[in-house]
Image (cartoon, rainbow, N blue to C red):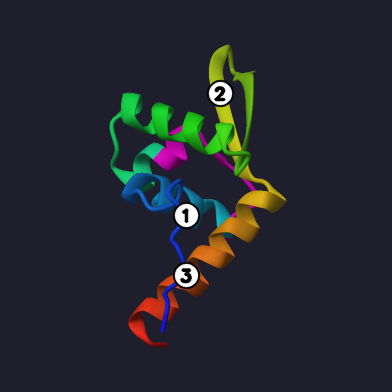
Amino acid sequence: MAFAPLDPVLHNQLRLAITSLLVAVEGADFNFLLEKTGATRGNLSVQISKLKEAGYVRVEKTFKDNYPNTACSLTPQGLAAFEHYVKAIKEYVGK
């Protein structure tokens, strides 16, 4: 039996955590993702950028109460990639 290849973009702990959180919500701001993942600001920013470059996450930068606000949401491509990743992992563990 051949295993399905795992998406290298999602096969990173923090990027997978970000994507998993975004699957469950319509959108999330940077501080929510920071709190939920426990990542550093710099690392979270880099991983969000990588997800954006892959077309998996939409990023909108605005101001909220005169402070910069970064909002993220999953794209249809990101949702499809996540679902494929989960299916592939299930094959690996025999479920």
Query: Which corner quadrant holds the C terminus?
Result: bottom left
Mark in the foreground, 3 or 1? 3
Q: Residues within 10 Å of mark 3 (few under 14, many from 20)?
A: few
- Which residue in the protein does label 1 denote? 7
Determine whether the residue tagged by mark 3 lies in a helix, strand or loop: loop
- For the residue marked with disc 3, what is the amino acid? Ala
Viewport quadrant of the N terminus? bottom left
In the rendered image, the residue lying farthest to the bottom is: 95
Q: Which amino acid type corresponds to the residue marked 1 in the rendered image?
A: Asp
| Marking on residue 4 | 3
Residue 87 x/y as whole percent: 51, 74
Residue 2 position in % (x across, y down)? 42, 77
Name the residue nearer the viewer: 90 or 23.
Answer: 90
**Is 93 drawn above or below residue 31 in the view shown?**
below
Secondary structure of residue under mark 2 = strand
Which residue occupies 38% across, 87% down?
94
- What element does badge 1 sit on? loop
Over which residues does the magenta segment extend?
Answer: 24-33
Q: Name the residue under label 2.
A: 69
In which quadrant of the rendered view does residue 68 lie? top right
Q: Residue 62 is drawn in which quadrant?
A: top right
Q: At x 42% / y 74%, what residue is drawn?
A: 3
Which dot marks residue 77?
none
